[in-house]
């Protein structure tokens, strides 16, 4: 069994839904994970915002407008009155539920219920369309098996057991459909998988059923060796190790959330990134197989702030770094890069919501300097320190770019450079030319 996940843009219109249906019908008994139709979740968030502020009139107006858009999609999707009516009856009932929420108290519990509606509608619309085509498709409701614990982490045992029961109840199905993103929590309320959303669902489901492959379908041709919006002539990376994919996901490759594929990694199930607009393209294969001696890609992360603390008290002292890091822990602020010397430590963060408080607390330990509007550029691949010259190639490419910090050795898959955000384009182009171009 393969897991095939399709994002919102892949099911964003009647034509897109039909294209996805053609793709998933090519093989039997795969399990398909669907996101909400593109734009739906953002609209539901907007509706929730109005309800939080008791602006019932605006909430009702947006609900009615969204319902009208779904009516158009349904009219275009089905060719028979029977299935058009089935789909509309279900979708209309969902919008009735939304309208009913406008006359009730609205809090976090209701918001989670509201946000689940997009995936519920998209999967039912696909189910009825497949049935209209004569496909024996079975719906496996995510709310019947996807459970998170009190810490918000997936309950893998519960997921595995209950998903197996649902599949066993439909042994002859040609295809299985389920919702991405949504789940239940331990108190029996509708909730969601915040990290990675539907990609996370696909990875969890794949691990639970022991899938042969997890396919993430988007309208992007896999991961690229650089940002195609900035660097011309980029190429899709055809193979990545899970660790390399995680590095790229964190440092700006928006196609894949860095934590969502962890269940697949631990279960040793390959993940393939594929393009719905070019279904015959090989995409990007991610697995646990290393590819020695290769540099795969370059990525960048904007809006970074660098903080340095200099203090003679650090010299030959123990406990100094622990005290510094505890400040960041107190304010729930993650650190990206760390570099130390005998009398100083520099760190980078991307969350500045508590920067003022952090700086004030750090001043107790030494002189604090802050550099804003920075950018982390990372080179990803087999960066083992035994690969003589790999790090020097990257640094040679950046010989004309001022570098604030360098991080090498913390990971065998990444060397990172902290530079000014204004120098990002020059850095990416220089690295691309020097690392990937035949004419360097």
Image (tube, rainbow, N blue to C red):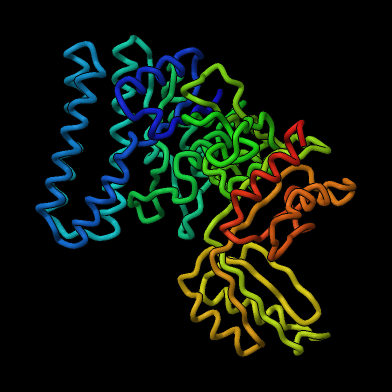
So how many labels did they put on this image? 0
- Please, is residue 138 above or below residue 434 in the view? above
Residue lying furthest front = 400
Q: State which quadrant residue 9 falls in.
A: top left
Identify the residue at horizontal 48%, vertical 31% (top origin): 218
Q: Position of residue 103 (x, y in %)?
A: 11, 54
- Report the front residue among 363 and 36: 363
- Please, is residue 159 above or below residue 165 in the view? below
Relative horizontal placement of residue 43, taking residue 237 as reference (left or right): left
Identify the residue at horizontal 55%, vertical 16% (top origin): 280
Would you say residue 243 is visible in this rendering?
no
- Report the front residue among 164 and 297: 297
- Please, is residue 348 above or below residue 75 in the view? below
Relative horizontal placement of residue 429, taking residue 354 as reference (left or right): right
Would you say residue 15 is visible in this rendering?
yes
The C terminus - image quarter? top right
The N terminus - image quarter? top right
- Report the front residue among 385 and 34: 385
Identify the residue at horizontal 81%, vertical 85% (top origin): 315
Identify the residue at horizontal 13%, vertical 40% (top origin): 64
Q: Position of residue 79 (x, y in %)?
A: 23, 11
Q: Position of residue 370 (x, y in %)?
A: 59, 75
Q: Position of residue 298 (x, y in %)?
A: 66, 44
Q: State which quadrant residue 213 falls in.
A: top right
């Amino acid at each position: 069994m393969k897991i095939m996940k399709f994002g919102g843009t892949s099911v964003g219109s009647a034509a897109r839904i039909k294209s996805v249906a053609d793709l998933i019908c090519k093989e039997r008994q795969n399990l398909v994970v669907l996101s909400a139709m593109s734009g739906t979740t953002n609209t539901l968030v907007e509706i929730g915002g109005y309800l939080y502020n008791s602006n019932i009139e605006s909430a009702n107006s947006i609900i009615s407008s969204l319902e009208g858009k779904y009516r158009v999609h349904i009219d275009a999707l089905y060719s028979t009155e029977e299935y058009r009516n089935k789909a509309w009856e279900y979708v209309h009932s969902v919008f009735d539920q939304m309208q009913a929420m406008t006359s009730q108290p609205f809090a976090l519990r209701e918001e989670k219920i509201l946000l689940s509606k997009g995936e519920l509608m998209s999967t039912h619309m696909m189910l009825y369309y497949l049935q209209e085509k004569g496909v024996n498709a079975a719906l496996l409701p995510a709310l019947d098996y996807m459970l998170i614990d009190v810490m918000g982490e997936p309950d893998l045992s519960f997921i595995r057991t209950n998903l197996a029961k649902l599949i066993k109840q439909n042994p002859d199905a040609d295809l299985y459909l389920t919702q991405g993103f949504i789940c239940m929590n331990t108190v029996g309320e509708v909730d969601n998988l915040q990290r990675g959303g539907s990609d996370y669902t696909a990875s969890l489901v794949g691990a639970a059923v022991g899938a042969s492959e997890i396919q993430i379908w988007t309208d992007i041709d896999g991961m690229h060796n650089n940002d195609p919006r900035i660097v011309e002539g980029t190429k899709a990376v055809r193979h990545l190790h899970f660790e390399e994919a995680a590095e790229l996901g964190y440092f700006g490759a928006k196609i894949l959330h860095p934590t969502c594929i962890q269940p697949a990694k631990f279960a040793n199930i390959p993940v393939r990134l594929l393009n719905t607009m070019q279904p015959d393209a090989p995409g990007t294969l991610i697995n646990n197989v290393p590819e020695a001696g290769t540099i795969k890609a370059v990525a960048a992360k904007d809006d970074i702030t660098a903080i340095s603390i200099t203090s003679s008290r650090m010299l030959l002292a123990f406990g100094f770094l622990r005290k510094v890091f505890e400040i960041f822990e107190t304010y729930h602020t993650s650190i990206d890069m760390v570099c130390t010397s005998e009398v100083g430590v520099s760190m980078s963060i991307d969350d500045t919501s508590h920067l003022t408080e952090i700086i004030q607390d750090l001043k107790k330990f030494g002189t604090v300097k802050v550099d804003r509007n920075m950018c982390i550029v990372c080179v990803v691949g087999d960066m083992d320190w035994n690969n003589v010259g790999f790090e020097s190639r990257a640094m040679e490419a950046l010989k004309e770019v001022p570098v604030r910090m360098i991080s090498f050795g913390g990971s065998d898959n990444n060397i990172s450079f902290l530079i000014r955000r204004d120098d990002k384009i020059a850095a990416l182009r220089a690295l691309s030319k020097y690392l990937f171009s035949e004419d360097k």
